Image (cartoon, rainbow, N blue to C red):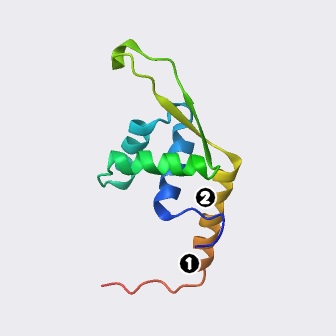
Amino acid sequence: MAPGIPSDFEQQVLLAVWRLGDAAYGASVRDELEARSGRPVAQGAVYITLVRLEKKGLLRSRIASPTPIRGGKAKRFFEILPAGTAGVLAARETMERLWEGLPEPAKR
């Protein structure tokens, strides 16, 4: 994989965080991925990927104050960083170059 280009699932997680803005935390990211992809996504895979992306410097997290609704548990919110945005844009440009000039698929 080219340096600076996140894996496919990392791209999906980054795009979900970017789309969710201030509301991006583990469960909301999973829900966004499932809603947009139409496929189930393992919560553990999302959390592991969020942590990995933060270690790579593509995301930043913050812990919010505990809420009474969640039994006093604090949510960890994520924010996409400029390096994360650059990574998904680079991936998009690469895919567009790969698609460029391909013939239309044959109709069945």
- What number is the disc on residue 88? 2
Query: Which amino acid type corresponds to the residue marked 1 in the rendered image?
Result: Trp
Residue 68 higher or lower than 2, as above or below: above
**Residue placed at 45% from the left, 23% from the top?**
74
Please indicate whether residue 94 sits to the left or right of residue 76 in the image. Answer: right
Q: Secondary structure under badge 1? A: helix
**Residue placed at 33% from the left, 16% from the top?**
71
Please indicate whether residue 89 sits to the left or right of residue 24 in the image. Answer: right
Q: CA distance from mark 1 to mark 2?
A: 16 Å
**Residue placed at 45% from the left, 17% from the top?**
66
Quarter of the image for residue 21 reads: top right
**Residue placed at 64% from the left, 59% from the top?**
87
- What number is the disc on residue 87? none
Please indicate whether residue 74 sits to the left or right of residue 81 in the image. Answer: left
Give the quadrant of the C terminus: bottom left
Q: In the rendered image, which residue does mark 1 sit on?
A: 99
